[in-house]
Amino acid sequence: MSQSNYPFRSIETKWQKIWSKNKTFKVRVSKNKPKYYCLEMFPYPSGKIHMGHVRNYTIGDVIARFKKMQGFNVLHPMGFDSFGQPAENAAIKNRTHPKIWTEKCIFWMRKELKELGFSYDWERELSTHLSDYYRWNQWIFLKLFKKNLAYKKKEEVNWCPDCETTLANEEVLDGKCWRCKSEVIQKELEQWFIKITSYKERLLEDLDKLKNWPAQVITMQRNWLGKSEGVEVYFKEKERGFTISVFTTRVDTIFGVTYLVLAPEHPLIKEIIKGRPQEKEVLEFIERIKNKPKSIRLSEGLKKEGIFSGGFAINPVNNEEIPIWIADYVLMEYGTGAIMAVPSHDQRDFLFAKEHNLQLKIVIQNPQNPVSDPKELKEAYEGDGIQVNSAQFDGLSNQEAKEKIANWIEEKGMGKRASYWRLRDWLISRQRYWGTPIPIIYCDRCGIVSVPEKDLPVRLPSKVSISGRGGSPLNYVKSFVQTKCPKCKGSARRETDTMATFFDSSWYFLRFCSPHYEKSPFNKKEVSFWMPVDQYIGGIEHAVLHLLYSRFFTKFLKDLGLVDFDEPFQRLLTQGMVLKDGEVMSKSRGNIVDPDSIVKRYGADTLRLYILFAAPPQVEMDWSEKGIEGAFRFLNRLWRLLDYVGKNKNKLSKDLEKSMHRAIKEVTEDIESFKLNTAISHIMEFLNSIYQNLNYDITKATETIVLLISVFCPHIASEMWQRLGFKKDLFKESWPRFDPFLLKEEKITYIIQINGKLRSKIEVDVNINEEELKEIVLSDPKVKRWIQDRPLKRFIHVPRRLVNLVI
RNA sequence: GGGCAAGUGGCGGAAUGGCAUACGCACAGGACUUAAAAUCCUGGGUCCUUUAAAGGACGUGAGGGUUCGACUCCCUCCUUGCCCACCA
């Protein structure tokens, strides 16, 4: 690197020290200013900052600094999501205690974050593994428990055999553990659940309030909640008379039902097959399906296994007798665990019917391609059409029939309208050490007893042996397990499961408002001042889990009267991933670029500038070393301005003044709409323009460009600001304003199109009227040549822009 | 299978329905230098006519449509990425 480069290393350390010593970014509230809470998703302390963090936190830092200079009280905190499995894995691998490992990681990450110059109020830092944080997890858990929203039940749960722990539905991806990628199996266990389903309606309805969230995230949450409205219909078993309920969203097809299908786990199966010749075969079938891991059941895709039960049911709408089948493609967890099959109008049913030679019956006629013989069907017709073979509903459109049939079924008592949801209750217990102990005590006399609030926190014992085998390590810590029952004072034992870490991160944004408050999870007054978060920034991978849980917690706390808002995050920005050569940067691919190495070679300002300039924040960006060079060159070019300031006494040129005001306008508007890449390109244009005007006095322009770049590259900006002679800290200055009057043009360039194609340009006075304009345009030599003697059909005039002549 | 997003020069990317390719990278030329680097300036969509100046045709994944005018809006299709997935 040549000696002409600006001394970024000394500048960056100098200003980081000054900011730290002066507590420049400590929150100081002025009563007459509005508030702005800018939050980035806090990291898991893995030990190293990666490029995704740099991108996330740089976007947030620009917004926080910008809002501060615009005169807001800004809350911009940072902390660590420090409970979780990797600490335990590291403990097993390196024989280090998870606490020691975690705190080392935090130390290194905090250092790196400081070296990137982010404007956090470090006095508000929090870590979720510390008891002054997790005690409030326990406190909130007890509130949930009291309201019957935390409960224990025995259930088939997702179990990761490698991690030896349970997983939430949300943590199972593709039948695999989200962390270690091993096959998840089903296991029956007593587990703690949070009744998030009690809030499903509100979680769905309030999505409409989130006007400033990406539509994509809203859709993903809506799909996850998965409300579907339909009708529950009662089918009678023909000989034994009991009722089988089925749920359908397509009640318009009910006259086309040719069989029923029950999930293999359905409790009524026993009753149906009892004493029938099929009994043994069916039991064998069920046993086989049950033993098949769910991941395999899913991966086999469209291959549907099934067996006839021997029983028949009566379709209540037309008294038709239909066979009852059992098949693995019907899930006990959804709906009623039983479906009515309409093979002509449902593709899954169609495939199953073809395979098992079951009947088909057409009840909705495709208007484009009417088919009357079901044998001609090549696939199910799932679209809209006209009802046929549907008794009194024949001839109606199926949409109309859907309503009328539902009404009729309800009137006759053959069923009722119902809605079913995909959302399940949230499984939070983990058989792991490194998490918040669940504050529950088991007493032989009193049963499940909650730990009294005054006894919180239930501290995580530090002496423990972690092997990664044999369930929860806390089970083996006698001094922890053995305790007294808070009710009867008799001997009792503690719950040894810990909480899933998503619990910790579901309310940390509230804790940041009063991080050291000791009387409750947060100071209500502080929270009602700062919350909701004005801008939340993080990765799309949290679109369902973290964001859904946080919304749920907020609603629960509102019901307790602890907060006065429904939704925690007003605006959400999901930033794109950082790629290298078109692939995600990851350890396994070995294509990681360490941010620290870039900071050492080019400085934090260059890294920050490049990562924002390379692509719009929401889009994925491809890492390029060449681009880094470009950003570095730009900062050097900016730095060199100092050599020219004050050298030339000529006045500020009109041209430069205009480009200065234009730059202020464009940069301001672009930051406000998160177009940070074009905001930077406008600063670059402005710098080019300063270099074109070195014959004039560039002092004012230089001061302005330093203010504009300061939110992106705070170190170099601070240093230049000082060298320009200012004593006051740059970040106490206000954001520059532009004068719209100076941006007014006197002359305007009109585009002249002929039949929509660009043919000429003319420069005219701004205030020209249409008559004059027409005259000038028609006398333009190029226009004359194009028109020749063809008649003018239309003269389209878009004021201040263009003229289109149609000939 | 369903949902969402995207497809623009050699590359990253710009463009309230109105100059396609701003800004940057890479490249080429010039200035400075003994030289190189750095720096400053200039030039680059493709093709055709032309010594040149200049002019023309074609150009935003493919095809169609709406419009005086489409990268932008609508329809069909292709490709890529992400998310969800036997959800009745």
Image: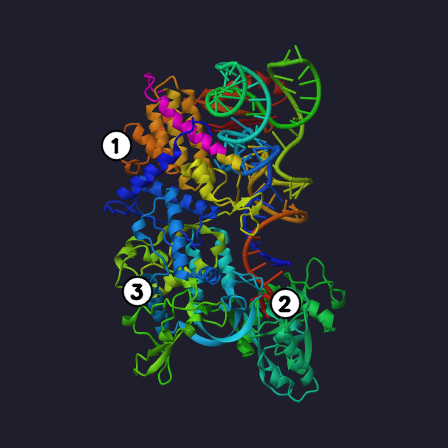
Q: Chain of mark 2?
A: A
From the top left corner, tell me how far across and down residue A553 is, in percent.
38, 63
Residue at label 3? A561
User: Could you give the CA–CA distance between mark 3 and mark 2, rounded to whole angstroms?
Assistant: 46 Å
What amino acid is at disc 2? Ile
Give the class, few, some or many, for how many residues have Cα within 10 Å of label 2's Cα (few <14, many ≥20).
Answer: few
Residue at label 1? A727
| First-in-chain label (3 vs 2) | 2
| First-in-chain label (2 vs 1) | 2
Q: Quadrant of the C terminus of chain A?
A: top right
Furthest toward the left, the residue is A31
Q: Are marks 1 and 3 in contact (CB under 8 Å)?
A: no
Query: Is residue A647 rendered magenta in the image?
Result: yes
Residue at label 2? A296
What amino acid is at disc 3? Gly
Residue placed most toward the observer, A374 or B67: A374
Badges 1 and 3, same chain: yes
Q: Chain of mark 3?
A: A
Residue placed most toward the observer, A147 or A467: A467
User: Could you give the CA–CA distance between mark 2 and mark 1, rounded to whole angstroms?
Assistant: 68 Å
Badges 2 and 1, same chain: yes
Give the class, few, some or many, for how many residues have Cα within 10 Å of label 3's Cα (few <14, many ≥20).
Answer: few
From the top left corner, tell me how far across and down residue B14 is, in percent.
50, 36
| First-in-chain label (1 vs 3) | 3
- At x 62%, y 75%, the residue is A291
What secondary structure prevails in the magenta region?
Answer: helix
> Of discs 3 and 2, which sits in the foreground?
2
Give the secondary structure at mark 2. Answer: helix
What amino acid is at disc 1? Lys
Furthest toward the front, the residue is A95
User: Could you give the CA–CA distance between mark 1 and mark 3, rounded to whole angstroms?
Assistant: 47 Å
Magenta-highlighted residues: A629-652
